[in-house]
């Protein structure tokens, strides 16, 4: 299925540097994170709804589609690059439990997946928006992985900086399960615009596509939920970037 028609139809389907201390990473009211300047199973449809418990709120639920990982339990790994070309990105996601005073949730299963530097997803025959040709990636599994949160609620993945495709802003998909495999939340992670602009105009193959054509604030997913889905990204093209983000679930 072509991605743009999927999004516009509204069909729901099931991202190496100094690490800041994690002890109190879940103890905050909301996950509003930015850099210098930035202008968002069970099946889950795109929504900005959230529920509060204690002093934090559940992160917005979003669609998993149209390209969720087909068998996520088969891709338990922290390095998800699989030979894809792009700027290095370390992804650090912390999971917190709103039903336990916003404490870190250990033992949770965290699946992530995102597109290549030029907008393709593995495991599907894909035609990303932006004029690229259709490519059959059904036998590939790049940029997909699963990790289990540690005692600090943290999972870490090694990947590349995602590209973009029309009509979406750059993003990473995340599906979180409890230790028994019950779905807790499907959500997405947004990127600061200034970082994206740097990557997309400075390095091939990103520069062949240029800047994203959809702002976070105009994105069909993030426009009503950016405050709790925007990540912090630090680093540089030469050294690689580190994305940090906290996601709140009701476990």
Image: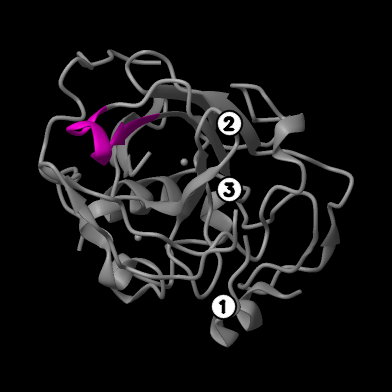
Residue 173's place in the image compared with 224, above or below, is above
Residue 32 rendering spot, x and y as whole percentages: 17, 48
Disc number for residue 180? 2
In the picture, measured across the screen, residue 70 lies left or right of residue 190, that is right
How far separated are the C-alphas under marks 2 and 1?
31 Å
Q: Nearer the viewer, residue 214 or 7?
A: 7
Q: Does the image show residue 126?
A: yes
Residue 160 rendering spot, x and y as whole percentages: 55, 35
In the picture, measured across the screen, residue 162 lies left or right of residue 93, that is right
Q: Dot 3: what SS?
A: loop
How far separated are the C-alphas under marks 3 and 2?
25 Å
First in sequence: mark 3 vs mark 2: 3
Eye-nearest disc, 3 or 2: 2
Residue at screen point 31% across, 37% down = 245
Residue 3: quarter of image: bottom right
Q: Point out the stretch of residues depicted in magenta.
A: 93-103
Residue 64 rendering spot, x and y as whole percentages: 57, 59
Disc number for residue 114? 3
Q: Nearer the viewer, residue 209 or 64?
A: 64
First in sequence: mark 3 vs mark 1: 1
Residue 18's place in the image compared with 59, above or below, is above
Image quadrant for the C terminus?
top left
User: Is 100 part of what is drawn in magenta?
Assistant: yes
Residue ID for mark 1:
7
């Amino acid at each position: 299925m072509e991605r743009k028609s999927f999004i516009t139809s509204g069909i729901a389907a099931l991202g190496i540097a100094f690490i800041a201390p994690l002890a109190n990473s879940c103890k905050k009211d909301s996950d509003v994170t930015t850099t210098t300047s930035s202008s968002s199973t069970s099946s889950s449809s795109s929504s900005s709804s959230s529920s509060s418990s204690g002093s934090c709120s559940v992160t917005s639920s979003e669609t998993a589609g149209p390209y969720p990982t087909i068998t996520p339990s088969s891709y338990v790994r922290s390095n998800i690059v699989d030979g894809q070309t792009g700027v290095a990105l370390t992804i650090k996601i912390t999971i917190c439990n709103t039903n336990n005073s916003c404490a870190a949730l250990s033992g949770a299963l965290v699946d992530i997946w995102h597109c290549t530097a030029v907008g393709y997803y593995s495991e599907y025959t894909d035609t990303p928006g932006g004029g690229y040709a259709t490519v059959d990636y059904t036998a590939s599994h790049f940029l997909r992985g699963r990790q289990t949160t540690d005692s600090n609620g943290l999972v870490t993945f090694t990947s590349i900086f995602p590209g973009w495709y029309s009509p979406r802003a750059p993003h990473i998909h995340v599906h979180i399960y409890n230790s028994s495999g019950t779905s807790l939340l499907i959500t997405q992670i947004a990127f600061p615009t200034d970082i994206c602009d740097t990557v997309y105009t400075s390095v091939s193959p990103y520069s062949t596509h240029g800047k994203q054509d959809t702002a976070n604030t105009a994105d069909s997913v993030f426009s009503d939920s950016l405050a709790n889905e925007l990540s912090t990204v630090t680093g540089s093209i030469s050294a690689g970037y580190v994305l940090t983000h906290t996601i709140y679930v009701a476990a």
